[in-house]
Image: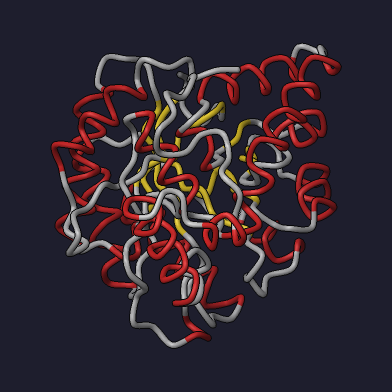
């Protein structure tokens, strides 16, 4: 994969034990399975990988494993280095560069002004010397105009747009500075984003259906819109019910069944709500997900579980196809 060319990246889960400790052996297995798929690269320690809930040494180990496994494969390794502190982010950015990652990305600093965000992105890009991808998230206070300003920072080469407002993504694509790229971050819209000009996608369900994700993107880019939208519709129907209950748990469960994930999300980070990273979610989400996991292991026929959430394709006991 050429540098800064986009494509479909698989946002790797970061397996952990019951005490939330990173499991490097299982992670390496997931990396090697993902490298067999027709995706263009790997995304390490992002939202799906729960990077902000991992210790720095665990994140560094994950980066090292992914880069080593992908070496010589032609696959791109993008490492999310955003952290709770500026200092930790700089340390992770420098480590990613030393390790041999192709690029870094970072979520916005919580509660930061536009000037502070610009200074932060300038610092991490300079610290790594790598292509740097910034974020446009539902929780971000940045306007489209402010994101475009940050894209002019030296070293910042693109943006991952996870905005719930698809019009914001369209506006970013229409006004992207020359040479910059946009990754779509929403599972429900990789085909519309590709049609509008997105250069790639990073969606959590690519852990489970990487071939389908790659097919959607390539079909859309080739102008085979009917086939691309048919596949998008099939996938949207598949995960519609699980998302209504808890966005994270079905992905972890399905990814585990496919051999690329772990059993449940890590416990919530002890951050105040106003400063919580955009993927942390409320404590209730983790507890609901964990409770659902426990019920399905010990009470598979519980009528109460079925009342809350119907079973869906892609759960524990199914052998999942990697394409549709």
Above or below: residue 271 compared with residue 51: below
Q: How many marks?
A: 0
The percent position of residue 272, horizontal first and vertical second, equals: 43, 88
Query: On the rendered image, what quadrant is the C terminus found in?
Result: top right
Is 31 in front, or is 258? 258
Is 24 in front, or is 150? 24
The percent position of residue 226, horizontal first and vertical second, equals: 86, 16
At x 54%, y 57%, the residue is: 303
At x 76%, y 49%, the residue is: 169
The percent position of residue 62, horizontal first and vertical second, equals: 22, 44
Picture quarter containing residue 12?
A: top left
Image-based side of 60 in relation to 235, left or right: left
Is 320 in front, or is 204? 320
The percent position of residue 190, horizontal first and vertical second, equals: 70, 34
Image-based side of 60 in relation to 294, left or right: left
Color theme of the render: secondary structure
Query: On the rendered image, what quadrant is the N terminus found in?
Result: top left
At x 31%, y 56%, the residue is: 127
At x 80%, y 24%, the residue is: 229
């Amino acid at each position: 994969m050429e540098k800064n060319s986009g494509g479909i990246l698989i946002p790797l889960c970061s397996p952990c034990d019951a005490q939330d400790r990173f499991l490097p052996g299982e992670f390496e297995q997931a990396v090697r399975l993902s490298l067999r798929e027709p995706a263009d690269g790997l995304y390490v320690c992002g939202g799906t990988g729960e990077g902000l809930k991992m210790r720095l040494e665990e994140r560094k180990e994950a980066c090292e494993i992914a880069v080593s496994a992908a070496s010589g494969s032609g696959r791109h390794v993008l490492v999310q280095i955003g952290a709770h502190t500026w200092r930790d982010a700089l340390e992770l950015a420098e480590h990613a560069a030393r390790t041999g990652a192709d690029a870094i990305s970072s979520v916005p600093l919580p509660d930061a002004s536009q000037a502070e965000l610009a200074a932060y992105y300038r610092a991490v890009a300079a610290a790594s010397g790598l292509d740097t991808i910034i974020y446009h998230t539902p929780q971000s206070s940045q306007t489209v105009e402010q994101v475009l300003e940050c894209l002019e920072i030296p070293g910042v080469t693109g943006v991952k747009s996870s905005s719930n407002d698809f019009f914001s993504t369209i506006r970013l694509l229409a006004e992207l500075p020359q040479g910059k790229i946009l990754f779509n971050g929403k599972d429900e819209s990789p085909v519309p984003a590709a049609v509008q000009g997105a250069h790639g996608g990073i969606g959590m369900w690519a852990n489970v259906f990487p071939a389908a994700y790659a097919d959607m993107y390539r079909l859309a880019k080739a102008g085979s819109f009917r086939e691309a939208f048919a596949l998008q519709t099939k996938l949207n129907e598949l995960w519609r019910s699980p998302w209504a209950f808890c966005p994270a748990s079905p992905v972890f469960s399905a990814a585990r069944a496919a051999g690329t994930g772990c059993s449940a999300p890590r416990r919530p980070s002890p951050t105040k709500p106003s400063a919580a990273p955009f993927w942390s979610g409320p404590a209730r989400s983790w507890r609901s997900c964990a409770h659902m996991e426990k019920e399905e292991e010990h009470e598979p026929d519980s009528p109460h579980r079925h009342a809350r959430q119907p079973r869906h394709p892609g759960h524990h006991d199914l052998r999942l196809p990697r394409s549709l």
